[in-house]
Image (cartoon, rainbow, N blue to C red):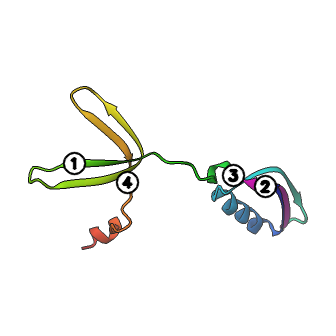
Amino acid sequence: MSLRLVIEGESNKVFNFMSEVKRTKMYRFYDKTKFTVSPTESKVECYLDESLQMKEKKRNVIKVVLQLSDEKRLEIDILDSKILDLGDKTIVIGKNYDIFAAPLNDVASK
């Protein structure tokens, strides 16, 4: 079921609001109609529904284990991974996010 959204007000505020809502990519907009109420005011009427981009999708997760020379192991969880076997070497591509890591600007300032 879709939603009908009507926004009316100062033209630049209406435009800024619509831009901000579209930036979230949570909704898909269609049948957009724009009216000029006065030289400084606008009205936008559109329909929207939940974007397919926001649906949760199953992500490919692997654990990469590196055996270090001093008998220690380093384990890294990789999201959206791809493994390329090039014969003499293997390349692992993916994303890793450490929720406990300090932001780069905090590290650089110390």
Quarter of the rendering occupied by the N terminus: bottom right
Q: Amino acid at mark 1?
A: Leu
Tell which tag, 4 or 1, sits nearer the viewer: 1
Q: Crowding at label 3, few (<14), some or many (≥20) Cα neighbours within 10 Å?
A: few
| Residue to which mark 1 is pinned | 66
Side (left or right) of 22 relative to 96: right
Identify which residue is drawn at 77% across, 65% down: 14
Residue 63 point in image, percent of width and height: 33, 49
Q: Amino acid at mark 2?
A: Leu
| Residue to which mark 4 is pinned | 96
Q: Amino acid at mark 4?
A: Asn
Q: Crowding at label 2, few (<14), some or many (≥20) Cα neighbours within 10 Å?
A: some
Residue 37 point in image, percent of width and height: 91, 64
- Residue 7 or residue 82, whichever sits in front: 82
Side (left or right) of 84 relative to 47: left
Tell which tag, 2 or 4, sits nearer the viewer: 4
Identify which residue is drawn at 35% across, 68% down: 100
Residue 65 point in image, percent of width and height: 25, 49
Could you give the CA–CA distance between mark 4 and mark 1, rounded to whole angstroms?
15 Å
Disc ID at residue 110: none
Q: Magenta segment: does it hold 73?
A: no
| Residue to which mark 2 is pinned | 48
Q: Give the structural element (helix, strand or loop) at label 3.
A: loop
Which of the two discs, 2 and 1, labels the residue nearer the N terminus? 2
Q: Crowding at label 1, few (<14), some or many (≥20) Cα neighbours within 10 Å?
A: few
Tell which tag, 3 or 1, sits nearer the viewer: 1
3 is higher (above) or lower (below) than 61: below
Could you give the CA–CA distance between mark 2 and mark 4, rounded to whole angstroms?
33 Å
Which of the two discs, 4 and 1, labels the residue nearer the N terminus? 1
- Residue 52 or residue 109, whichever sits in front: 52
84 is higher (above) or lower (below) than 37: above
